Image: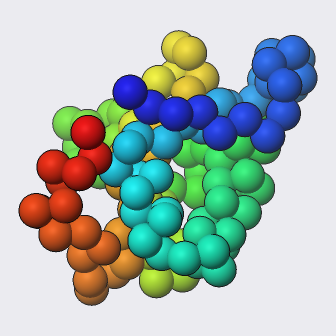
Amino acid sequence: MARRHDWIDEETIRKQNLWVVEFSPFAIHSLRVLGWRSAGLLLGYIERQLHAMPSPYGVGRRMGSLSDNMWRYEVGNYRMVAQHDHKRRVITIVFIEQRGRRLMDEKDDDDLG
């Protein structure tokens, strides 16, 4: 179950044709592992580049030719992978990792619930 991070109320989102950003449990855990400074950098990027833009497709890269709804965003040393639902205008951040280093081990996956 993804958790929403709403910066603006639903009526404003509809009027301005904005995208809603949700976070998977894995992405939320990754943000906690990163610490407040790095998490702030990533959340600021999400707010400025994904949430507030009419189209988030210009700032990311599509992952593979067959995967139209999976996108990769690079912010400093971090990589975010997101799934786009164009009909609902929802971006779900699937996971976040530091390039060259995994933030979680496979054994930590059981702790996510």
Residue 18 picture quarter? top right
Give x and y (percent) for residue 112. Answer: 28, 46
**Quick one: 11 or 15, which is closer to the camera?**
11
- Quarter in which the C terminus is drawn: top left
Left-right relation of 21 to 111: right
Left-right relation of 7 to 31: right
Coloring scheme of the render? rainbow
Left-right relation of 14 to 57: right
> At x 52% / y 33%, what residue is drawn?
3
Work out whether residue 70 can be spotted. Answer: yes
Give x and y (percent) for residue 89. Answer: 60, 23
Residue 97 picture quarter? bottom left
> At x 61% / y 44%, what residue is drawn?
56
Work out whether residue 82 can be spotted. Answer: no
Give x and y (percent) for residue 86. Answer: 52, 22
Give x and y (percent) for residue 48. Answer: 76, 56
Q: How many marks?
A: 0
> At x 38% / y 27%, what residue is drawn?
1
For residue 46, above or below residue 101:
above
> At x 87% / y 15%, what residue is drawn?
11
For residue 66, above or below residue 44:
above
For residue 63, above or below residue 9:
below
**Quick one: 94 or 83, which is closer to the camera?**
94
Left-right relation of 7 to 40: right
